[in-house]
Image: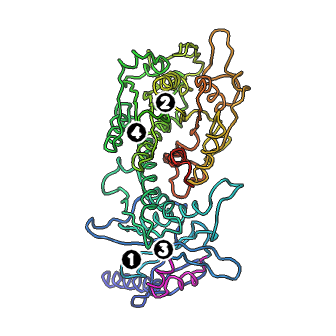
Amino acid sequence: MMLATRAGNAFYKTMQLYKRMRVTKSWLQVNTNEGILRRPWQIRRLTGIQQCRRFATKCDDSAVVKGVVVGVYTKEGDREPKLTSSGEKFDDRAQGKISELVRETNMKGDLGKGLVFMNVDPEFSAVAVVGLGQEGAGFNDLEMIDEGMENARVAAGVGARALQLQGVTDVFVDSMEYPEQAAEGSALAIWRYNSNRRKQDRTHIPKLELYDSPDVDAWTRGLFKAESQNLARRLSDAPANQMTPTIFAQSTVDALCPCGVSVDIRSMDWIEENHLNSFLMVAKGSCEPPVVLEINYCGTAPEDKPILLLGKGLTYNSGGLCLRPKNCMQIYRGCMAGAAVCVATIRAAAALSLPLNISAVLPLCENMPSGMAVKPGDVVTLLNGKTLGIKDVSKAGVVVMADPLIYAQANFKPRLVVDIATLGKGVCCGLGGSAAGIFSNSNFVFKQFEKAGGLTGDRLWRLPLWNYFKRLISPNITYDLSNRGRGPASSCIAAAVLHELVPCVDWAHIDIRNVGMLTRYAPLPYLLRDRMTGRPTRTIIQFLYQMACPDNK
């Protein structure tokens, strides 16, 4: 009797499951917002910005699963959404199935929104159709961005990530009329920092290919730029115990020396001999030995003056004796994002063979509390003879950069200085994650950066470098400059301190405290929430290209 009851229950459950599925032969029933569709092709909603799944579907390492990303422009008036030129060719290849599915699913072509269609083509098992927004979009003067280029990045990134999460191993990407930007968006979107996960739990990073476009050179340039930003993301996102000053130096050698870039590693003895005392004031609080990297890329005549990059390299900033709150302390492993961006930029410059000379100085150390740590109120004499009072040890960025900045100008005699650092919270409050803050004593340099940011989609916004802020850092009764100054304008005050150390050369200071570390709110669709961003690597690469090739538009 009991066996008969169990058999009856099993049969009843099977029948109920069969009624719910209602699958006949190869036809698959799919629920959508518009109702119920019965098609022989599987459809998956493409969520765009949402990131719910943490790893892709596991597949055989030897199996090749191909997928393709195509773009569709938004519906305008009575006109139906329009596929890109490559999308139309793929639609012809699929005997009109793509355009038919676009109509039946009522896709509107909204930017970054789309669908993944399965088993439409015998070669490509998955097809991601993603909205590109308005056709013919160009430069928006109000937004200060080229919307056509940015739309290509967003659509390509969203589509490539969706196929990645479906277990696709080879992703072919529609150029969307902007092959370089499509390469950037897709390569940035599929990248993951997987080093500390078990192999079976790691997200598979698929291979990227350009679909149906002859402009392979532009596609390759985009991949170079994106991979450089991914290098900055990897360096910044690594835990502090896995990215000490020494490990960072070795990672820099591994990344740059194969590209023909020279890297000199300066140890404690050299630092003491060259009297980089402000740097040592912070570095001595940690057991990790400090390191200064000197990097040189020679793309033109050796006698030509270089562009100097200076990156803040605090591989961990606990705040020293002015300890930071415990809830956010883990994010300060990213205080070396400025140095990471410099390394990534020079790698891209070498890969692109830019015709200019670039030098970089990267002071690397930790800011830790100990019996040897710098104390609030300490004063250090800089290489230019000025004294710097350290009122707040947690604001150690300008202290670490002060003497290396003076040394680099005297040693390399650059035509332009660009320093990149995570310094003040002011840019976080004022700009959020929209743009990095830039301070410059040259209108020409700022205009070039503004143009570069508009083309790369990683914008910079100019903040004031007025005498008002210089009065907030000096004078003082006992020393010349203060690392904290007076008042709440932390980013402007930090820039004013650095400006005092740049006597006469063209100079730009980029504060990436808001964009170079974790992105918590409204991240770019082709980047990840709560991960290090590597921004603004591509903007600085574009800036260097404009400086090297001013006649090219």
Of residues 278 and 223, the one drawn nearer to the viewer in this rendering = 223
Q: Residues within 10 Å of mark 3 (few under 14, many from 20)?
A: many
Residue sitting farthest toward the right: 468
Q: x%, y% of residue 207?
A: 36, 63
Q: Amino acid at mark 2?
A: Asn
Q: Nearer the viewer, residue 342 or 353?
A: 353
What's the CA distance linking mark 2 and mark 1? 48 Å
Q: Are marks 2 and 4 in contact (CB under 8 Å)?
A: no
- The magenta stretch is 86-107
* Rendering coords of residue 430 (x, y %): 68, 41
Looking at the image, is 385 positioned above or below residue 491?
Answer: above
Which residue is pictured at 44% across the width and 20% down the height? 285
For residue 518, say whether it is visible.
no
Relative to 89, residue 457 above or below: above
Residue drawn at (52%, 52%) of the image: 529
To which residue does mark 2 refer? 317
Q: Which residue is mark 1?
A: 124
**Horizontal placement of 154 versus 3: left or right?**
right
Residue 298 — which label?
Answer: 4
In what quadrant of the picture does the N terminus appear?
Answer: bottom left
Q: CA distance from mark 3 to mark 2?
A: 43 Å
- Sequence-wise first label, 3 or 4: 3
Foreground tag (1 vs 4) = 4
Q: Quadrant of the C terminus?
A: bottom right
Marks 3/1: CA distance? 12 Å
Task: Say few, some or many: other residues with alpha carbon within 10 Å of mark 2 (under 14 / 14 to 19 / 20 or more).
Answer: many
In space, the residues marked 1 and 4 are separated at their CA atoms by: 44 Å
Provide the residue designation for mark 3: 116
Q: Name the residue type under label 1.
A: Phe
Q: Is residue 279 visible?
A: yes
Of tags 2 and 1, which is closer to the observer?
1
Q: Which tag, 1 or 4, sits closer to the chain's start?
A: 1
